[in-house]
Amino acid sequence: MNVTLVHSAVQPHVPMSIAAAEPVLRVRNLEVTYYTDSGRAKALDNVSFSLKAGEKLGMVGESGSGKSTLALAMMRMIKPPGRIEGGQVLVGDTDLMALDQEGMRKARLSRIAYIPQGAMNSLNPVMRIGAQMIDAVRSHLPDEPKPAVEARCKRALQSVDLDAGVFRMYAHELSGGMKQRVCIAIGILLDPDVIIADEPTSALDVVTQRQVMETIDNVQKAINAAVILIGHDMGLMAQFVDRVAVMYAGRLVEMSSVREMFTDPKHPYSRALIRSLPSLDNKGVFQGIPGLAPSLLRLPTGCAFHPRCDSAMPECSTARPEAQILPGGRSVTCHLFDGEA
Amino acid sequence: MADLLRLENVSKVYSRGLINAQSTIALRNMSLTLREDEPTILTVAGESGSGKTTLAMLLLGFILPTTGQIIYRGRNISTLHGGDKMAYRREVQAVFQDPFAVFNPFYTVDHLLTVPIQRFKLAKSKADARSKMEEALTAVGLRPEDILGRFPHQLSGGQRQRINVARALLLKPKLLIADEPVSMVDASLRATILETLRNLQRDHGVSIIYITHDLTTAYHIAKSIIVLYRGSVMEAGDVDTVIKDPQHPYTQLLVDSIPWPNLDQRWGAQPIKAREAGGGGGGCRFRSRCPQAMEICATEPPLFGLSPSHTASCYLHQEQPEVAMARLSELLPA
């Protein structure tokens, strides 16, 4: 802490979050396979990335591209027939994959929090909101006195703009947006280093969606956590995140800053994704991505995207592309950029 | 020319409880005319609880209005019987939000297409039925050989949703009510389904009522738009005018909250007032959240005409001429 203070005294313009350049989250070579009756499906294939404190990453891709599997794998909540086959998830200096069951239970919520998809359905209908929050705190901090726990819960509710009265309410008394914000409040109870939000607004209308996203934004700034936002709404990404990662068939095909992604996407799939976006200027132009996402059980050879790719070359159907780090730090997994790194 | 479907002062009130009866006005005094000779795409937009799905259910005849009437080809739909009712059922079709829930997992997807063919006696023989199914699937951009004989779980959400559109198309409807057809479909497939819908209107002369909370897709597919809030019309008119230059504070809030995929077009800074629970009193429904609420807003605002194809129900525009609700459809370009 002292070091940082001295550091920021020398460079007063650099905020602390950037001065601490060490990434808070490092995912290395994460692999997940589902063993199904009809074969092995590699849902995550060698996924690596890192995030600094306070950074917001958007994870986009079609259904079945592995976005939610990635979130579950990082939480070590993959259920059979799925299995984490290898890799590391480092939060600070702790490798979550190396922890024992009890250690992982402690790390969830306190180091890394997960706001699940359709969070509104994950609240217990027969428990008051407050009781569920206290439950979460108690399981991590069994020795904290009751008034302190309650104060902590109410502070969390306050930080997501909910009335303290919500503490005594049941889930059915709240609207969809309020329930979603309760889930965010639970997620931040223990000031985690990393928050993973899996499509937090997919069932909400635009106004509520904006409210919820602004809530996540404020909360994230307050505790300086790294956020991974999973979703397929590129508009939401443009409004919210700093960096965008594009997933396709279990692989990370491109990762760059949000501005680079929107103005100069590199991978043909990201290009098609950006092209398919509706905007105010091109009324009535519908440009979908031709073809369908491949089944993980029968992935095309070489690059999994080559059957749908408009700039496919002969080698794309035989050789698998590896991630290239382009000048400027963005990474692309495509043969078009071989040798540019 | 003939009106296909006409809503006359339709209200729908849901009440619950016997003694301390509480009632929610899901739709109030709605009038709307859909003409047979001018196929159009009309968007009905609004947030959850705005009454847009109630409107869809009313149009489909699944629920009956509390007051007012729905006229189909000159006859009230609540009194339709026999052949007339069958014709109405065939000509007014629906595509629903959830492409997963409409399929019975025990049947192949063919079931969804063969049942209406049998029910409405559309085909003379099995081969005829098969060719009609293939034709409908091709029209929505699917390859029949990939689809027929499969089970729902073997298909993607986008494929299933297009089968729903194909089913509607099979019946050669006059009106298609699409209730949030793309909200559960991947962004990359949305464009394809919307394009299918638009071709339906352009090539097959089907009018479409597109019900959504997503103004981005509404802007791209529709010609005209009606913005609902808690059962009342807030603003209506040409879709370009309404979305690019919204005049009602509610529409402004909605448009302001669209996450445009454009880095230089940020979300508005206008703070959002939380929506109050309960039905609220009389007057403008948006009053409690409106940043520009005035005293006069406690009385129900009529529609004020802003231009020949734009109207807003807001006292901010009270110097403009009033428009009768019954004339709402005249302001919507076809």
Image: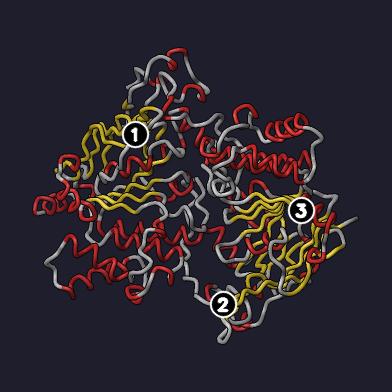
Task: Out of A262 and A110, give the one closest to the viewer.
Answer: A110
| C-alpha span from label 2 to label 3 | 33 Å
Which label number is shown at residue B89? Answer: 3
| C-alpha span from label 3 to label 1 | 45 Å
Task: Out of B61 and A306, give the one closest to the viewer.
Answer: B61
Percent coordinates x, y for residue B195 in the rendering: 65, 39
- Chain identity of mark 2: B
Q: Which residue is mark 2?
A: B279
- Chain identity of mark 1: A
| C-alpha span from label 2 to label 1 | 49 Å
Amino acid carrying mark 1 in the image: Tyr
Report the residue at 78% width, 31% height from top.
B128
- Chain identity of mark 3: B
Asked if marks 3 and 1 fall on the same chain, the answer is no
Q: Which residue is mark 1?
A: A34
Residue B32 located left or right of residue B149: right
* Callout in the foreground (2, 3): 3
Amino acid carrying mark 3 in the image: Arg
**Disc 1 element:** strand
Amino acid carrying mark 2 in the image: Gly
Which label number is shown at residue A150? Answer: none
Residue A127 located left or right of residue B297: left
